[in-house]
Amino acid sequence: MAELPAGERIAYRTCPLCEATCGLELTIRGDTVTRVRGDRDDVFSRGYLCPKGVALGELHADPDRLRAPLIRDGDAFRVASWPEAYAAVAAGLAPILARGDRDAVAIYGGNPLAHNMESSLYLRPLVKAVGSRNFYTSSTVDQMPRHLVAGLMFGDPMALAVPDIDRMDYLLMLGANPWESNGSLWTAPNLPARLRLLRRRGGRLVVVDPRRTRTARHADQHLAIRPGSDAPWLLALINVILADDLARPGRLATMTSGLDGLAAAVAPFTPEAVAALCGITPDVTRQVAHALAASPAAAVYARFGAQATRSGTLVTWATEVLNILTGNLDREGGVMFPRAVHERVRGTEAGAGFKTGRWRSRVRGFPEVMSEFPGTTLPDEIETPGAGQVRALLTIAGNPVLSNPDGQRLDRALGTLEFMVSVDIYLNETTRHADVILPPPSPLEHSHYDLLFNRFAVREVANYSAPVLSATGPSESEILARLALIAGGRDLATPTAVIDEAMLDELIAREIANPHSSIADCSPAEIRAAVDGDTPGDRILDFMLRTGPRGDGFGRDVAGLSLARLREAPHGVDFGPLASALPARIRTRSGRIELNSTVIDDELARVRRELSAPPAADALLLVGRREFQSNNSWLHNLPSLIGEADRCVLQMHPQDAARRGLQDGATVRLGSATGAVEVPLAITDEVAPGVVSLPHGYGHAALRVRLARAQRWPGASYNDVVAGEIDQPSGNAVLNAVPVTVAAV
Ligand SMILES: Nc1nc2c(c(=O)[nH]1)N[C@H]1C(S)=C(S)[C@@H](COP(=O)(O)OP(=O)(O)OC[C@H]3O[C@@H](n4cnc5c(=O)[nH]c(N)nc54)[C@H](O)[C@@H]3O)O[C@H]1N2
Ligand SMILES: Nc1nc2c(c(=O)[nH]1)N[C@H]1C(S)=C(S)[C@@H](COP(=O)(O)OP(=O)(O)OC[C@H]3O[C@@H](n4cnc5c(=O)[nH]c(N)nc54)[C@H](O)[C@@H]3O)O[C@H]1N2
Ligand code: SF4
Ligand SMILES: [Mo]
């Protein structure tokens, strides 16, 4: 490597901005990032990065990023010290907690939590200390159907198989656009290159999307399905596979219960019966079913676009059924269960199964799923008086006013709370309602390890990043621990180490009680003394790594993994491709993969009724779109990402525009049964006729936000048009395939 100029240094850091987990090489001068490049030596990403990774230095330097707590002062905010801010939180929550109704305090956790080791670890003790049933996260505007179906079928909501992209021959992808999103619940840096390689080695990529996306343009076949109709179409594929005797589940047959009933369940969904609803001809449906079944190693993968619909759960179920019927689940080159090096080692005994609806939401009676209620019902819980009414809210790394349906209503509801605290790095559309904002350090100021995304990765990899710069304020784990202590009624002099030590002690105790653990029956004190790490989060990580499947077992395997070993590998460690995980991964009570459930029966019956109600000829359905330089609602303030033009434009097919007499560039009113926004029109045949598309995460025109650059092109919020409809079984919001009207302003 060339000599660095005096005063400069190089640091390596995994990018925390999306699920691809790219390794970055940062050049630092003082406390300034002067250059960001892809780390060519990163064992997983091999130098790949996108414009967002490049902007990580801008995020750190953004003058609008909060660096000190803010306390509300009338209509404005004033900067406060940390002790003052914590005292304000304690004083604000005290009267509400004193009423003895824990449900009166709600928590909303957002997407960046999942990308942050400290906050993802410390959310749990906070939620426990608050003790409220009003727990919400961005999972119910995203992937809850995946968790529900994994729970129902495999007995474990985290049993999410990923396409084994580097070894497959055929990939059928629905509602995903990895060319722009870089993949979701599928961690594989540089998916564009991996998808290109699939085709170069003779494989086929088939993309099902109502828009001709960048991913679709790189596919062998693009099917512009009618939005919201993936479930019946996938059921038709199952129908063809069974009717034409193409099912070859192989070893999965004896592991799976419910295969016998499938043919009857999908009988109404013939290619002919679904053709009008899906906009896909019977020949094409048959051709895809045959090609899928004939491929030695293939995968069906459905993601956000197809899941955030009215049939998200059924789409996900049908996807899994196809992977089982074709023998591709748990097969190399099919879909495989990743294993992360920090996971717990388990035995093969049957699991405890998975339950939902252990409690229900107060106002609308929605069942909890993974201890969460649908985010769409948070306004109901705030607005409806009575015992259990939400009177205080903690938001952590979330912007639900822009990310959840009916944002305007939530915006109004937040204004009626008695007290609100936000742990966030920006004063934005949501946090402007807070009484106290507590800003954690920037991503460059804390250590990083992907606790979540390593569990969805296509290789077994591990990568630890030390802090690149030192933080001036408390860590995010300290902030959340302090909030947990306050919610638990402890005084402000109680050290947060109480929470740190309790977490570690609990982990150690549980592990020692696990008969399959490398430290089963060890002395807790001996283990605690040997745990290594500079921060509470790092110590938990060290413990997890050392007791994980590749761990050193605290000296029981000297060559094994530990935090110290990961620190010596700044480009990461690669333990190779995924390996078969069945039947051990099955945690249902029966010990088999369960295809049957009343949830699925009800959904099949509902979708069967849709077959007889074909769409009106002039109907318009709204779908979303992610842009390469954007990340949900919160990177619009960075100079290199925001661009020189309004990107929040409504795409419409030329036929639909002509029928309505609309001109390209005109401002139009996009309306639904519940709301409307005004946006510029872009006429393009990238969207199918009958489909319009708007990106989400815009709508930055609100008063009292501190997002100077984002306000240059504020755009309008997609979620002001969308109301609170959900995929019933999972509680996931319906964000795509929303009926709308478009008219000239
Ligand atoms: N219409 C429509 N709606 C959607 C979607 C869509 O496609 N269409 N997508 C959905 C999806 S997939 C998701 S995941 C959700 C996201 O929903 P949310 O998580 O509610 O929203 P984000 O826009 O990700 O906002 C993240 C917040 O975290 C803050 N933040 C960033 N980094 C940190 C950090 O390190 N610590 C803390 N404490 N805060 C931080 C940001 O300032 C911002 O306020 O949106 C969903 N909403
Ligand atoms: N650049 C960028 N990258 C991101 C994000 C971002 O905001 N910007 N967000 C991150 C997050 S939080 C997530 S969850 C992931 C999501 O990543 P992906 O799962 O890849 O989802 P999207 O990129 O939203 O692509 C969804 C596609 O579904 C299509 N679609 C809409 N409705 C339907 C339908 O009914 N059926 C079918 N078959 N397709 C439909 C849309 O046209 C769109 O092309 O992306 C992550 N990466
Ligand atoms: S693809 Fe994702 S992880 Fe990679 S640099 Fe871009 S935002 Fe970061
Ligand atoms: Mo997401």
Image (cartoon, rainbow, N blue to C red):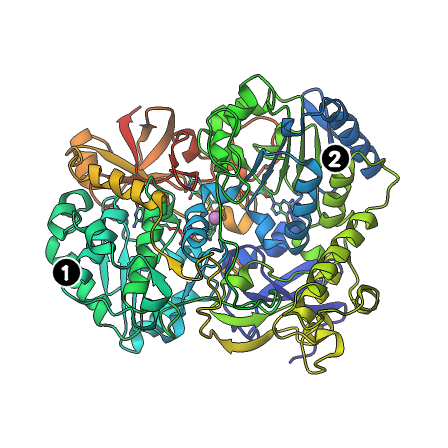
| Mark 2 crowdedness (10 Å alpha carbons): few <14, some 14-19, many ≥20 | many
Q: Which residue lies most toward the bottom here?
A: 559
Q: Residue at x 66, y 65 (%)?
A: 514
Residue 147 position (above or below residue 622):
below
Residue 442 position (above or below residue 731):
below
* Camera-nearest residue between 484 and 581: 581
* Camera-nearest residue between 628 and 412: 412
Amino acid at pointer 2 = Ala
Among the 4 quarters of the image, the one containing residue 174: bottom left
Amino acid at pointer 1 = Ala
The x and y percentages for residue 537 are 72, 57
The x and y percentages for residue 378 are 52, 29
Quadrant into which the C terminus falls: top left
| Mark 1 residue's CB less than 8 Å from ligand 2 | no
The x and y percentages for residue 32 are 70, 57
Of the two numbered discs 1 and 2 on the same chain, state the one appearing first in sequence.
1
| Residue 699 visible, this angle | no
* Mark 1: secondary structure: helix
Q: Which residue lies most toward the top here?
A: 385
* Mark 2: secondary structure: helix
| Mark 1 crowdedness (10 Å alpha carbons): few <14, some 14-19, many ≥20 | few
The residue indicated by pointer 2 is 487
Q: Residue at x 37, y 55 (%)?
A: 177
The residue indicated by pointer 1 is 243
Question: Disc 1 versus disc 2: distance between alpha carbons?
Answer: 58 Å
The x and y percentages for residue 574 are 56, 76
